[in-house]
Amino acid sequence: LDDVTANVIYLTGRKAHTARAEIRYRQPARVGETLVLAGWVEREKGRLVVLKGEARRKSDDALVAECESTFMLDRSQP
């Protein structure tokens, strides 16, 4: 989920690094099981960007894990 949230920033053309990532595991995922991953920006303030992400089981849409990550934008970014 750290990669999922990092890719949200990357896809906007900005560079950043993880300052904090908190992941909560809700249910087990089995080997070979398909998961659907999603990430989005919750808020931005200055150089800090707070994102959320989740992993859901494709077969029944059950929440397997969720995260909240804080990223610090590269100083060279506008």
Image: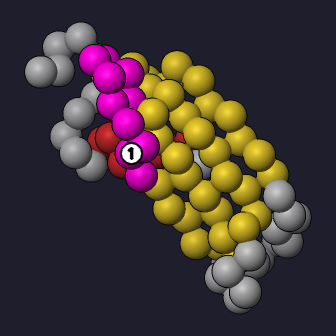
Magenta segment boundaries in residue numbering:
40-49
Up the image or down, 19 lies above or below 54; here it is above
- Residue for point 38% across, 30% down: 49
Relative side of 24 to 78, left or right: right
Relative side of 59 to 14, left or right: right
- Residue for point 38% across, 37% down: 43
- Residue for point 71% across, 41% down: 23
- Residue for point 32% across, 23% down: 45
Can residue 4 be seen in the rendering of this structure?
A: no
Please tell me whether residue 45 belongs to the stretch shown in magenta: yes
Three-letter code, disc 1: Val
Quarter where residue 9 is shown: top left
SS for dot 1: strand
User: Which residue sits furthest top?
Assistant: 75
Task: Please tell me which residue lies in front, 6 or 45.
Answer: 45
Relative side of 35 to 19, left or right: right
The chief SS type of the magenta part is strand
Task: Please tell me which residue lies in front, 52 or 11.
Answer: 52
The residue that mark 1 highlights is: 41
Up the image or down, 74 lies above or below 50; here it is above
